[in-house]
Image (spheres, rainbow, N blue to C red):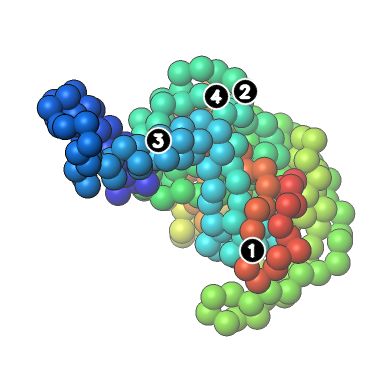
Amino acid sequence: MDFALIMFVALVVTGIIWLIDSIAFKPKRPADAKMPVLAEYAKSFFPVILAVFLLRSFLVEPFKIPSGSMLPTLLVGDFILVNKYTYGIRLPIANLKIIPVGEPKTGDVMVFRYPQDPSLDYIKRVVGVPGDVVTYRNKRLIINGKLIPQTRDGSFDYVTHGLVAVNSDQYLEKLGTHIHKILLQPAMPTLYTDQVNSQFPYRQNCDYNNDGFTCKVPPGYYFMMGDNRDSSNDSRYWGFVPDRNIVGRAFMIWWNFDHPTRVGHFIK
C-alpha cells in the first residue's frame, strides 16, 4: 500500500474519532472525567499526522537510494530529499497537478513512479523533455542533433550487491545547465536490444538498432537515463515517463550511514 495512502487513512480515522468524541461524548462527561484512551490517542496523533502528511505531500519527501543506477552522483544507501512543488502542486495520492509551477528541465535528477508499476518509485536524470529528439549511439548522447560534450575524469570502481567488482570510466557531461559525472564500461554493449519493451506507449517514436536508438519525446512525457549508463534500467528499455507520474526533483542528500561526509551535499 502507498505510504501516502496509509497516512491519509490514519489522518481520517484519528480525525473522525476525535470529532465524534468532541461532539457526541465530551458534552455528556463530567468536567473532571478523563477522556477515553482511544479519543485521547486520536487527539494527540491527529495534528502530528496532519503535519507530516502536508509536509510530505506538498513540500519535501525523503527517499532512500536502493541501487547503483545513479552512480557516481548517488550512492546506494544515500537518503535524499525531494522537492514536491518544483514541478507543480499535486493532489496527494491521486498525484493530479492542480497548480502549475514549473516543468522538468534537461539535466534534472527526478523521482517518478515507474510507468510499468506505479507503486514503485524510480530516480533518474532527465535527458529529454517534450519535443526533444534523443539519440544514443556508441555510448554518446545526442539531443536535437547536438552531441553532448563528454570529458574524461578518471575512473570509478565499485562493488555490486552481488559482490562483483566493477571498473568504470568516469566522464563529466553537461546537460542543460547541469555538469555531472557519468560512468561507462567500455566492454559493455551500447544497448541490449533484446531487453527493450516493444509495447510501451509511443514506441513508434523510437528507432532501435545494435548501435543504439533515436526517440522523439511526445508531448507530456520525459526521457530518463541513469548516470551509471551501462547499469541502469531506464527509458531506453521501458519508454517515456508521463507527467502524471512525476513525484519531484531530488535536491539534497540528508544522510548516509556508511558515508556521513555526504550529508548536506546538493545533488547536481
Report how far apart the C-alphas of labels 3 and 2 lie in the structure. 30 Å
Q: Which residue is mark 1?
A: 256
Name which quarter of the figure residue 217 lies in. top right
**Which SS class for mark 1?**
loop
Discs 1/4, front: 1
Q: Which residue is mark 4?
A: 88
Residue at 76% of width from left, 63% of height from top? 261
**Which SS class for mark 4?**
loop
Report how far apart the C-alphas of labels 1 and 3 lie in the structure. 29 Å
Report how far apart the C-alphas of labels 3 and 4 lie in the structure. 25 Å
**Which SS class for mark 3?**
helix
As drawn, the label of residue 47 is 3
Q: Amino acid at mark 1?
A: Asn
Instruction: Give 193 or 114, whichever is nearer the viewer.
Output: 114
Residue at 46% of width from left, 23% of height from top? 97
Report how far apart the C-alphas of labels 2 and 1 lie in the structure. 30 Å
Q: Which residue is mark 2?
A: 102
